[in-house]
Amino acid sequence: MNRYNKLVRDGIPEHLEARGIKYTSRILKPDERKRALLRKLIEEAQELCDDPGLAERADVAEVLIALDAAHEFTPEAIEEARIQKLNEKGGFEKAVFLESTD
């Protein structure tokens, strides 16, 4: 038996059933969902580091969309916070890599 203990896409149970694979799953409570989504974001971000392709970037976007919904963040609020942070500290266009401070 393979153990996963992780959040998966909604369609995975149907794929498993179609292949005749037995599985166990459960629906997470709201607080569990938020924690699982954060862990999933780390997982997907690592996969994007390992394979910086469009499919992996799309996976990260999907998790972020789910996190926004779980936290009830609106696109407008996210954009406002993004712009505020951009104005305060800048973006990442210059590729500044901080090596040390004293």
Image (tube, rainbow, N blue to C red):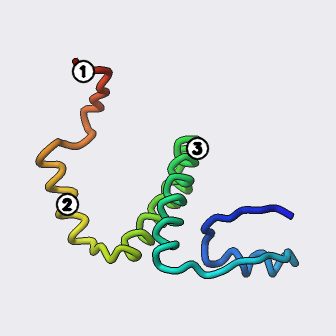
Q: Quadrant of residue 16?
A: bottom right
Near-viewer residue (10 or 58): 10
Q: Secondary structure at mark 2?
A: helix
The image's mark for residue 51 is 3
The quadrant of the picture occupied by the C terminus is top left
N-terminal-most mark, 3 or 1: 3
Q: Which residue is mark 2?
A: 81
For badge 1, the amino acid type reads: Thr
Residue extending furthest toward the left: 87
- For the residues labelled 3 and 1, the Cα–Cα distance comes to 32 Å
* Secondary structure of residue under mark 1: loop
Q: Of marks 2 and 1, which one's residue comes earlier in the chain?
A: 2
Mark positioned earlier in the residue sequence (2 or 3): 3
Q: Which mark is residue 101?
A: 1
Q: CA distance from mark 2 to mark 3?
A: 29 Å
* Relative to 60, 86 lies left or right: left
Residue located at (58% from left, 48% from top)? 47
In the rendered image, residue 17, in percent from the top left (x then y), is placed at 80, 81
User: Quarter-wise, where is residue 18 in the image?
Assistant: bottom right
**In the rendered image of this protein, does residue 23 appear above or below residue 48?**
below
Label 1, residues with CA under 10 Å away: few <14, some 14-19, many ≥20: few
